Amino acid sequence: MTQTELKTKKNVANYASVKDFLKHNYRHFNAASIIDAAEAYVNHLDKGGKMFVTLGGAMSTAELGISLAEMIRQGKVHAICCTGANLEEDIFNLVAHNDYIRVPQYRELTAEQEIELRNRGMNRVTDTCIPEDTAIRKLEKHVLELWQKADKEGKRYFPYEFMYQLIQSGKLEKEYQIDPKDSWIIAACQANLPIFTPGWEDSTLGNIFVSHVRSKDISSFNVVKSGLEQMSLLIDWYLENSKASSVGFFQIAGGIAGDFPICVVPLIQQDLQLDCKFWGYFCQISDSTTSYGSYSGAVPNEKITWGKLEADTPRFIIESDATIVAPLIFAYVLAE
């Protein structure tokens, strides 16, 4: 048996032990919902279904790639929609992990201490600070070259395609500071998964791109394809992948990463007047509570009225911290 086979066998054993622990201890309330959602995820895949995963919040900085990358490699995830921040922050961590600092007492920081972090170029995300120079500016240099190349050649790409170009170029390999198997972007690139990033301009690289257009380093905003074009691409992807399969929707956190893609079904059915299947599975992990007008906190039943889910769609909501729950569900699914 090769070292790779031994490692795979060990990982499967580890996932199985996590699954056994969950099934024995997680019997009620939110805990039971985790089991229900995980088992339904497995059943969906076993029936030939595909899974669409969305990432809100700061999941990449939380290093969700450690478990998500393996899900992608094992064919448990078939497309992703994420914020622009999640798209870039997985790569920030990939090339600058050693320069990140953790601030466990972040709740006690004074305004003066926050200014000190700012002056050090440490951009804080809860208890984790992303280094400006070794993460953001390091990546900017490489991505700017790709933007300018596309501009010169009169070509246009989606945000994720530029990230794939960067990874495939090999220019970052000598900069890796974590095991590349723990990068979900690398796994997605290797699997050639589409990554939809609505509202990409609401990200560090999106802001940087705008600055270079205004500085005339890039001639036009059109170098990067828009969110409307991403929706059109999603229509094509959904129609193709739902022909022979049911497509599930696994939403981590809330916001635009989840709101944008789930609308593709009513768009196809109501606006294009074409037949397509409803989403065949739905699960959301969120700490947003149900309240007046909160879509992120809305119960899944509300999505039935909007033509996104059917009455018999398996649907789950887990009101908890996604950084804790998502890796547990992934381990459960990977144990199969």
Image (spheres, rainbow, N blue to C red):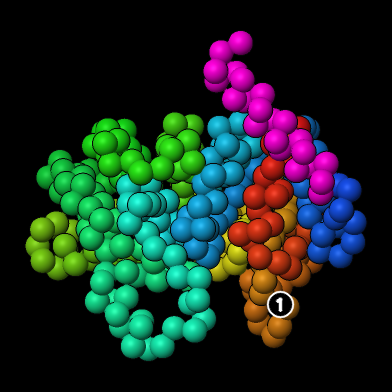
The relative height of residue 171 versus residue 26 in the rendered view (above or below) is above
Residue 276 coordinates in the image, percent (x, y):
67, 46
The answer to which quarter of the image holds residue 110 is bottom left
The residue sitting at the left extreme is 216
Please state the extent of the stretch shown in magenta in the rendering.
1-22
- Kindly identify the amino acid type of the residue bearing the numbered disc 1: Thr
1 left or right of 154 in image: right
Residue 86 coordinates in the image, percent (x, y):
45, 57
Residue at point 56%, 13% (across, down): 2
Prevailing secondary structure class for the magenta stretch in the rendered image: helix
225 left or right of 47 in image: left
Q: Nearer the viewer, residue 60 or 153?
A: 60
Q: Where is mark 1, residue-wise?
A: 289
Residue at point 75%, 63% (across, down): 318
Residue 9 on the magenta span: yes
Residue at point 82%, 46% (across, down): 21
User: Is disc 1 surrounded by few (<14), some (14 to 19) or many (20+) residues within 10 Å?
Assistant: some
> Residue 45, can we see it?
no
Quarter of the figure that contains the C terminus: top right
Residue 264 coordinates in the image, percent (x, y):
58, 55
The answer to which quarter of the image holds residue 251 is bottom right
Residue at point 48%, 55% (across, down): 60
Residue 232 coordinates in the image, percent (x, y):
46, 51
